[in-house]
Amino acid sequence: MEILDKKSTEINSFFTGLEELLDTIGKALKNRTPRDCKQNCVSER
């Protein structure tokens, strides 16, 4: 079994993927629009 360190391609690829995911989540949150409660809430009868 190979010992992985911060220089291995697997670790580098893993953290690159995490950074891309964090970027995508950040962009999604930045560009989201707030919900309109009048359309999405259940009305009381």
Image: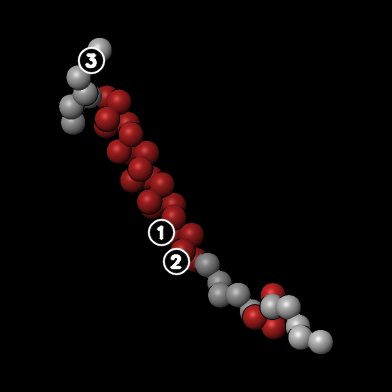
Q: Is residue 13 above or below residue 44?
A: above
Mark 2 is on which residue type? Lys
Q: At numbered mark 1, what does the secondary structure look like: helix, strand or loop?
A: helix
Task: State the residue at coordinates (44%, 59%).
Answer: 27
Residue that carries the numbered disc 2 in the rendered image: 30
Report the Cα–Cα distance between label 1 and label 2. Answer: 6 Å
Task: State the residue at coordinates (60%, 75%).
Answer: 35
Are the residues at dot 1 and dot 2 in contact (C-beta closer than 8 Å)? yes
Report the Cα–Cα distance between label 3 and label 1. Answer: 34 Å
Q: Is residue 39 above or below residue 7?
A: below
Report the Cα–Cα distance between label 2 and label 3. Answer: 40 Å
Task: State the residue at coordinates (56%, 75%).
Answer: 34
- Residue that lies at the very extreme toward the front in this rendered image: 45
Q: Is residue 5 above or below residue 26?
A: above
Colouring method of the image: secondary structure
Give the mark toward the camera: 3 or 1. 3
Does residue 38 appear to the left or right of 27 in the view shown? right
Residue that carries the numbered disc 1 in the rendered image: 26
Are the residues at dot 3 and dot 1 in contact (C-beta closer than 8 Å)? no
Residue that carries the numbered disc 3 in the rendered image: 2
The location of residue 17, given as percent across then percent down, is: 37, 39
The location of residue 40, given as percent across then percent down, is: 69, 75
- Image-quadrant location for residue 11: top left
Give the mark toward the camera: 2 or 3. 3
- Image-quadrant location for residue 25: bottom left
In the image, 31 versus 44, the foreground residue is: 44
Q: Residues within 10 Å of mark 2 (few under 14, many from 20)?
A: few
